[in-house]
Image (cartoon, rainbow, N blue to C red):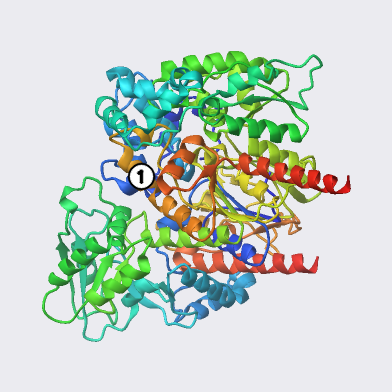
Amino acid sequence: MTFHDAATRDFPAFSTDACIKCNVCTTVCPVSRVTDAFPGPKYVGPQAQRFRGPSVHDRSPDHTVDLCSGCGICTRACPAGVLIAETNNRARAAIVEARGTSLRNRLISDTDLLIRLGSNLLAPVANIGLRNRLLRWLAEKVLGIHRRGPLAPFSRTTFRRWWREQRRPTTVPAVPDPGRTVVYFHGCAVNGFEPELGRDAVAVLERNGFAVIVPPQECCGLPFISNGLYEHARRKAQRNLGSLASFARAGYRIVGTSTSCTHALKAEYREMLDLADDDARAVADATWDICELLTDLHDRGELDTGFAPIPERLPYHPPCQLKSHGIGTPAMDLFALVPGLRAVDSDHDCCGAAGTYGLKKERWQIAQDVGAPLFAKVRAAAATGAVRAACDSETCRWQIEQSSGVRTVHPVTILAESYRRADAATDERWRRVV
Amino acid sequence: MPTADVVVIGAGLSGLSCAAELAERGARVFLAAKGMASTHWTHGGLDVAAPDGAATPRAGARALAARDGHPYAIVQGDLEAAVTAHGGRMRAGGIGLVGSLDTPLVEIPTAIGALRPAALLPDAQAGAREPWGNDGLLLVGIDRYRDAWAPYAARNLAASGWPDGPRDVRAVTVRLDGLDRLRNLNARSLAHLFDDPAWRSRALRAIAAAVPPGTWRIGLPAVLGITTHRQVLADARAALGPSVFESPSLPPSVPGMRLFDVLREAILARGGRVQVGFDVVDVERDDGRIVAIHTEAASRTLRLAADRFVLATGGIGGEGIRAGADGRLDERVFGLAVSAPQRDAWFSDDPLVPHPLEAAGIRTDDELRPLDPSGALALDNVHVIGSALAGMHYLAERCGDGVALASAHRVAAALAAARIAA
């Protein structure tokens, strides 16, 4: 990708004229690596785009674009600056708009609805359903959700409910302090499936002197974007922007623990959903991935580096969405601060899950094949002593964990654990003194 | 912001090699590139120097070093160590590098049946430069694979007047198992099929069965595996003879992909960072030095501060230098002065006979630091390597890989030595 003016960023298809037909994108596409059904980014992107108009309402000559998983690797590899993945995502949305899509795709995209149905009181029942092989078989037959698709169990207490019960702040403090207060965008995954990650994130932020606010918010809308349901995504996006923009304008940083959600706030609202007004720009500029924020803090000499040793080898997979941020691999920089922790970059393109892609009956095998070398690397690390793996995006974590059998956590979980161990060691020393 | 001693800009042969060597020598290195670069379009061997009349790469480099303003005038002495280090990196990644600077340059066939002089080749291509004796050359095409046309290449070679060439050149096209069911066959998908042991064994049997009577050396498109290339090559030699060789096909080039993978892995294995996909959009300067560069990002920019910066963004072909309609040539990252012919001398009837504009680039001092038009140092902590350097015609002189490696080695070794001294 090369730097584009605002017009190209707002209309990615304009960039396809710059394609020099070198085929580099075809050599890096993880989907065309494993299936002949997908002709690769060049054919469904810059080639097919010549037959499409610039509007999202124009028809597509080639429906194989729907096999694109949206990882974005092609866009980053392109030496000519073509926004290939973004163009293809819009082409899929045009197909969905013209032909509609399945109930399955609407359902798995509506994560907030699923969490309302499955979390809190109903979680024990819902989780029995998720584990029940007969019900999963039925879900595959009736809905098309693969029976071995990576689904995390619903949480018994959503993150938002825990926050309310703790009577934690949802709006700006009485004395505003944007420098030392951050807004936490937890995303749907932390809310409904991994609230403990949210608690770890809050602990790490508070440890470093930040007050944390959790204002009203919904799913970022990325699952809808990936499934071409732009109108649904736009509704989610607009409600989030309505809630977050005032914080962004007041100078508060918006911090997320999912590199997928934060990338949606930073880039996809604009590049896919045409949301480029002042609110959207303010939120994009204020949004930070949590590891990005912590390394920034470290650069200023303000990060609490009192990390207790975690002597283990940690296979780390930088997810595709993180790579699209263009922020390096901040988790690797943070891992280097934890004594004894030996993090190893997986050096693998994609885990295959790509959000909801790996859940779909007809895509599951592709997703497994894409991630297979990664699962093998993680299993090999486990066979030689690694006890877990790490990755910044939730559906990637679930895919790696389910397919490798190795527990996979967010980088912040490791940092929070290291801080807790440091506290425990301090307490122990005090006990001995007293 | 990642912590780095050195930021390398560009992911072609020079940038990757420089970053790998810096990482090997213990420096913290961050490689930033706006996209994939030349590796995926080139043949995976080393073009060190082959000006007209040169018998070996070393002699060629010596002749080029005598030319006015050629990069070899500065980096020729680094060539030996650079090529040795590159061979070591390739071997560690499972790819042998055959030949040396003193290996005679011999004509070998290209994908379209032209001839090019070569001395240093990946193991898998080395069979093409062994003496032909009484051997014939059998070019094997693969049915439905469109990026390597054996009959076309054979016809061109037969008419080429190949000196000391094979007894005869012939082409066969073989049908390999299952390919007629595929819709999207390209170099990578074929290479992945060869990585599959069962498919490979059937394919090699089918190719062997298509060889006519007589003594033939077999040339295949360069698709002999990616992830298990060494094993694929061994199996191909067992089935088709020890001198079977692969010829790089039209881009994308599988040997170039292997090269890129080996070098990226070498950087990551030593704790270096590689970020592909984001262009440099801003530069912080302070009194003749670069403090930091900023690369574009999903929002804001990524600030990359370092003690030293290595510019490996290529020449006009690699977009490190861009020509404007007004006749100006811009170096895109630091805005360095570009040494180039006047606008009215930009044109040539034949782009492959030394083209005047090809020599455009950055002039440097002996430490490869950029100079301004008056000859004074332009930036104290920036080093320029690879095709961004002025004064070479890398197509006609076939010197691009040698200059890339030698300049990368010169900078990496000097920076590492300075770090130890400091």
In this picture, is A90 found above or below B139? above
Q: Residue at x 69, y 50 (%)?
A: A338
Residue projecting furthest to the left: B213
The subunit letter for the residue under badge 1 reads A
Q: Which residue is mark 1?
A: A368
Q: Quadrant of residue B111?
A: bottom left
Q: Position of residue B204 (x, y in %)?
A: 21, 68
Q: Position of residue B61 (x, y in %)?
A: 53, 75
Judge whether B300 appears above or below B226 on screen.
above
Residue occupying image coordinates x 29% and y 52%: B186
Q: Position of residue B245 (x, y in %)?
A: 30, 72
Quadrant where the N terminus of chain B lies?
A: top right
Instruction: For residue B311, say whether it is visible.
Output: no
Question: Viewer-proximal residue, B30 or B377?
Answer: B30
The x and y percentages for residue A95 are 31, 23
Say few, some or many: other residues with alpha carbon within 10 Å of mark 1 (under 14 / 14 to 19 / 20 or more). Answer: many
Q: Amino acid at mark 1?
A: Gln
**In screen coordinates, is B169 left or right of B321?**
left
